[in-house]
Image (cartoon, grey):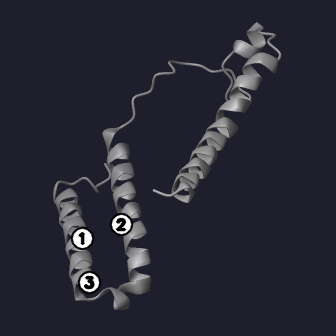
Amino acid sequence: MTPEYYQQYIIVGVLIFGALGMGILPLVLAKFVAPKKPNPTKQAPYECGMEASGDPWVQFNVQYYIYALLFVIFDVEILFILPWALVWRNLGIMAFIEMILFIAILGVGLAYAWRKGALEWD
């Protein structure tokens, strides 16, 4: 293999270490440089200018998570469909069939969630 081939890996390695350094260096510097003056006011919980009251542990309805999961699934679907829609004429019939199959699988999942009542708000 040629030296130019390895130089490309060296450049990628330098970029990776640079990116890691840009993320880690400020955290390390803040650990050593930031002033540390703890007091009860700084340690107190704060929310919207009011004193916190009640138990901080609140159990949410599972239905919120189901809605969030369904949103993420269909959001990811759009991430796949949008680029495909821009170039589908150049991809051929197999790409069209694969996308129809992809949409059908997600449609079956949506129909299942609908049938189980996951989309009903109580």
Q: CA distance from mark 1 to mark 3?
A: 10 Å
First reached walking from the N terminus: tag 1 or tag 2: 2
The numbered disc on residue 96 is 3
First reached walking from the N terminus: tag 2 or tag 3: 2
Residue 26 in the image: x percent, y percent? 73, 31
Query: What's the amino acid at mark 2?
Result: Glu
User: What residue sits 40% from the left and 82% below the top?
Assistant: 85
- Residue 48 visible within the image: no
- Residue 89 visible within the image: yes
User: What residue sits 19% from the left and 74% below the top?
Assistant: 101
Residue wearing tag 1? 102
Residue 76 in the image: x percent, y percent? 39, 61
Query: What's the amino acid at mark 1?
Result: Phe
**Side (left or right) of 72 relative to 56:** left
Within 10 Å of disc 3 (Cα), the crowding (few <14, some 14-19, many 20+) is some
Identify the element where label 1 is drawn.
helix
Q: CA distance from mark 2 to mark 3?
A: 15 Å
Q: Are marks 1 and 2 in contact (CB under 8 Å)?
A: yes
Identify the element where label 2 is drawn.
helix
Relative depth, front residue between 72 and 53: 72
Relative depth, front residue between 26 and 102: 26
Residue wearing tag 2? 77
Identify the element where label 3 is drawn.
helix
User: What residue sits 17% from the left and 54% below the top?
Assistant: 116
**Side (left or right) of 82 relative to 4:** left
* The N terminus: image quadrant: bottom left
Residue 53 in the image: x percent, y percent? 59, 19
Within 10 Å of disc 2 (Cα), the crowding (few <14, some 14-19, many 20+) is some
